[in-house]
Image (cartoon, rainbow, N blue to C red):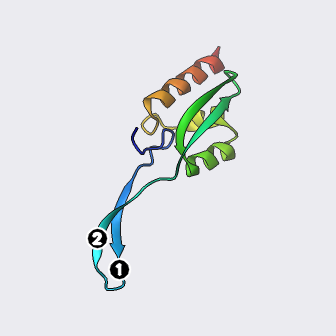
Amino acid sequence: MSRRCELTGKGPMSGNNVSHAKNRTRRRFLPNLQDVSLRSDTLGRTFRFKISNHALRTVDHRGGLDAFMAKAKDVELSPAALKVKKEIAKATVA
């Protein structure tokens, strides 16, 4: 699995390790990914995602998975999360 957040699209960044002698070597900054189960109140089910800690805080701030998916951009979501978003949207309209 790639090291990419399924809800925000946050992935690895690159930069430098800098020693005391100012020697620079390339390194990677990985996102803080967690395996979590998020519950959809509309569908009454839980979904497992691998998301960053920042995304988990955003989901809580917006009021749950359903509210987060309503505002989320389709480009940032993984294919699995996009499928969940469409399910929630369909259940909300009906």
Q: Which residue is drawn at the image coordinates 35% and 71% (left, top)? A: 17
Residue on which the image places disc 2: 25
- Expressed as whole percent of the image width and height from the top left, the position of residue 79 reads 43, 29
- For badge 1, the amino acid type reads Ser
Which sits in the foreground, 6 or 69? Answer: 6
Quick one: SS at disc 1?
loop
Horizontal side of 24 relative to 67 (left or right) equals left
Q: Residue furthest bottom?
A: 21
- Expressed as whole percent of the image width and height from the top left, the position of residue 33 reads 51, 48
Quick one: SS at disc 2?
strand
Bin the neighbour count of mark 2 within 10 Å (Cα to Cα): few under 14, some 14-19, many 20 and up.
few
Q: Quadrant of residue 20?
A: bottom left
- Expressed as whole percent of the image width and height from the top left, the position of residue 21 reads 31, 86
Tell me the CA gap for discs 2 and 1: 9 Å
Q: Quadrant of the C terminus?
A: top right
Q: Residue furthest top?
A: 94
Q: Which residue is drawn at the image coordinates 49% and 43% (left, top)? A: 8
Q: Which mark is residue 8?
A: none
Q: Which mark is residue 19?
A: 1
Q: Which residue is drawn at the image coordinates 48% and 28% (left, top)? A: 80
Question: Number of labelled discs?
Answer: 2
- For badge 2, the amino acid type reads Thr
Which sits in the foreground, 40 or 94? Answer: 40
Q: Is residue 20 above or below residue 88?
A: below
